[in-house]
Image (tube, coloured by chain):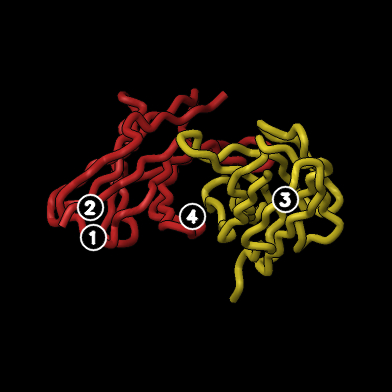
Amino acid sequence: NAGVTQTPKFRVLKTGQSMTLLCAQDMNHEYMYWYRQDPGMGLRLIHYSVGEGTTAKGEVPDGYNVSRLKKQNFLLGLESAAPSQTSVYFCASTPFKTGPRYGYTFGSGTRLTVV
Amino acid sequence: AQSVTQPDIHITVSEGASLELRCNYSYGATPYLFWYVQSPGQGLQLLLKYFSGDTLVQGIKGFEAEFKRSQSSFNLRKPSVHWSDAAEYFCAVGNNNAGNMLTFGGGTRLMVKP
């Protein structure tokens, strides 16, 4: 029972490079989220998706794009990485039918450094 | 808009001592409240949650939290801390918004002295 799996776990990018972070869940959850975690700031929502083919902006969407082509996968893209995007990125998912009471299931995170 | 404040960035307690981590939220109606724990290099694990009923909720690893509407608080407690409890703790609030989104506090890092 894998839950939420994020790849890669670590990555170092040069400024201006692009990359895609992959999140995969095997719980058949409708909702998926991308957060970034920075010291003292908790987790901030980047983008989220309420179902296959749908995405929406969160609190800090600038510089990121997302896609949800399959229900189980949620991709986060950085088209031109900047040092300000150095962070730990977490993916999470939750089912639709329970509403907010279920809470999230989190992946183990991707630590990204942009130099 | 909902928000969460965790006033203590760092807390240090001795092993065996009691613990209370503070969480204050801002939300107009009855919120859904959560505490998560993050061990170093790991993802976030759900400790406990509250959405209705008894205002004192029990969670895993011996933790409990009390919802106090009058104080807009949801403080996390443990009677006797173990060295393995050293981690970062996040309080979060949700509501019946589109997308079931949670808003997280800034976190409290707990250190345990032997």
Q: Position of residue A57 (x, y in %)?
A: 75, 35
> Separation of disc 2 and disc 4 at Cα?
19 Å
How many neighbours does mark 4 have within 10 angstroms: few (below 14), some (14-19), or many (20 or more)? many
To which residue does mark 4 refer? Answer: B44
Can residue B39 be seen from the camera position used here? yes
Callout 4: residue from which chain?
A: B
Tell me which corner region of the image, top left, top right, bottom left or bottom right, holds residue B76: top left
Amino acid at dot 4: Leu
Amino acid at dot 3: Leu
| A62 horizontally vs B16: left or right | right
Callout 3: residue from which chain?
A: A
Amino acid at dot 1: Trp
**Pointer 1 or 2: first along the chain:** 1
Q: Residue furthest bottom?
A: A1
- Foreground: A80 or B30? A80
Secondary structure state at the residue bearing disc 3: strand
